[in-house]
């Protein structure tokens, strides 16, 4: 160990006073080699502004990489692609007179149970997805054998054909939507105006 110290002292003496400073500066530059503007000597354990900026830049890069990996990928998704819905698909229904698109539902309306009073198809709103593209009209009161029935009717947007009714207004929830027997067709070409 003493031999190494003696050899180092001899080497530094051979460089002279300016060479010794150059050797120290070269060693310091190798230590802080990634920043060419670094010329300040620091005390051990003391952080400089450059160190703080470099650490912050590194932290931001890591945070950005993590946020990119946490983002989700947007893909086109249809009801046919879903494994959750199983065999269900959305069926479009059209006005039987003009062929206007009136109802989209995950059930065929012609296959739904019929109501005994007027033979209209009853769609259970809590069991089936559906969207009505119709104009909602007035409230109508009908006399039935066991009392009075309230109907909030909806009509085709284009030809104003009555499509069906609900027991509550459009803004409220109700158990069933009823569709008149011959008001809708599943194929647009089956409409009277398009034959």
Image (cartoon, rainbow, N blue to C red):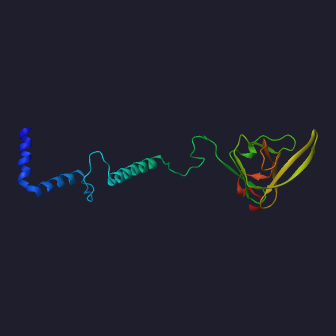
Q: Which is nearer the eye, 4 or 58?
A: 4
**Looking at the image, residue 122 lies above or below residue 92:** above
Residue 102 pos. (x, y %): 74, 54
Q: Which is nearer the eye, 98 or 86?
A: 86
In the drawing, does residue 134 fall left or right of residue 75?
Answer: right
The residue sitting at 6% across, 43% down in the picture is 6
**Looking at the image, residue 72 lies above or below residue 98:** above
In the drawing, does residue 31 fall left or right of residue 85?
Answer: left
Residue 124 pos. (x, y %): 75, 41
Residue 172 pos. (x, y %): 78, 47
Q: Quadrant of residue 36?
A: bottom left
Q: Which is nearer the eye, 40 or 167?
A: 40
The residue sitting at 43% across, 51% down in the picture is 64
Quarter the C terminus occupies: bottom right
Quarter the N terminus occupies: top left
Q: So how many labels did they put on this image?
A: 0
Q: Which is nearer the eye, 91 or 53?
A: 53
The residue sitting at 89% across, 50% down in the picture is 140
Residue 22 pos. (x, y %): 15, 56
């Amino acid at each position: 160990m003493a031999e190494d110290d003696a050899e180092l002292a001899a080497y530094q003496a051979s460089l002279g006073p300016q060479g010794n400073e150059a050797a120290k500066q070269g060693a310091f530059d190798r230590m802080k080699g990634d920043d060419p503007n670094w010329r300040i000597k620091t005390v051990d354990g003391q952080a400089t502004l450059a160190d703080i900026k470099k650490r912050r830049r590194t932290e931001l890069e890591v945070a950005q990489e993590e946020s990119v990996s946490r983002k989700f990928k947007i893909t086109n998704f249809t009801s046919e692609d879903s494994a959750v819905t199983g065999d269900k698909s959305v069926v479009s229904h059209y006005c039987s007179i003009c062929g206007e698109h009136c109802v989209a539902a995950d059930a065929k309306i012609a296959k739904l149970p019929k109501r005994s009073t007027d033979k209209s198809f009853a769609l259970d709103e809590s069991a089936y997805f559906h969207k009505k593209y119709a104009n909602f009209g007035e409230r109508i009161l009908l006399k039935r054998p066991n009392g009075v029935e309230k109907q909030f009717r909806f009509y085709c947007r284009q030809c104003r054909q009555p499509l069906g009714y609900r027991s509550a207004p459009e803004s409220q929830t109700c158990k069933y939507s009823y569709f008149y027997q011959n008001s809708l067709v599943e194929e647009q070409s089956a409409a009277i105006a398009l034959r």
